Amino acid sequence: MTPSPNSSASPALQVDFSLDLICPWCWIGLRNLLAARAALMDKYPGQQLAIAWHADTLLPHIPEQGVPYQAFYEARLGGPKAVEARRAQVRASAAAAGLQINHAAIQIFPNTRLVCALVNYAQTQLGGEAMIGFVESIFDAYFVQGRDIGSAVELQQLADSAALDWDSVSFDAVRYQSELGHAGGVPHLVFNQRLQVTGAVPPAELLRAMEHARAADQSLV
């Protein structure tokens, strides 16, 4: 007997999510993933999503204390006009995902080695919605409040707010470096270890990818 497409017995869909906390496209990509998850659960009641987080710094050469944000992007993109054009693109995509990016509040472009290791560590204590909320709190701290997420002091406050047992002084960041070592663009998502998507693609595209991965696994049963 063929299972109903609305069966509640489906195993959780596994998602490996590679990201860097300094990348606004990763926040947009997360929001798009959550929108796609809602659509998937509407279509297949009882279907769950299990996210494994793989945070890794894309620019490890950035000094530990960070660098001036505006100057960094002007040098990277070729001047203030190019920076503003890129930011307008980011803001438009963010708005479509229900987000507002406050570039004017950001003063420091941080080294994200510590915050990425913290995210990888956090999932040893937090799960499901709590973990999503913690990651979003970091994105919000940086892209809305302009806080320096390269600062151990700021990260300690964020960890404490999430009731996370974390001590920045004794934390071994090397131990919690990403195991995937994804060298391409982020966000990068892998569904059920078989179907890959790179970039902050629209929710509809993510939904199609999840349905394909889900169908492929069910065909093996």
Image (cartoon, rainbow, N blue to C red):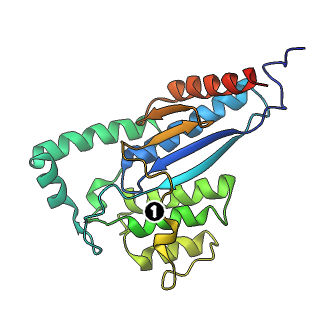
Q: Quadrant of residue 150?
A: bottom left
Q: Which residue is mark 1?
A: 116
Which quarter shows the C terminus?
top right
Q: Nearer the viewer, residue 29 or 59?
A: 59
Q: Spot the residue most to the left.
A: 79
- Position of residue 17 relative to residue 219, above or below, is below
Which quarter shows the N terminus?
top right
Q: Nearer the viewer, residue 33 or 178?
A: 178
Q: Spot the residue most to the right.
A: 1
- Position of residue 117 relative to residue 50, above or below, is below
Query: Is the residue marked by circle 1 packed among few (<14), some (14-19), or many (20+) residues within 10 Å?
Result: many
| Residue sitting at x 67%, y 29% | 40
- Left or right: residue 65 compared with residue 30: left
- Left or right: residue 32 compared with residue 15: left
Total numbered labels placed on residues in the image: 1
Mark 1 lies on a secondary structure that is helix
Disc 1 marks which amino acid? Cys
How far across and how far down the image is residue 212, in percent? 61, 22
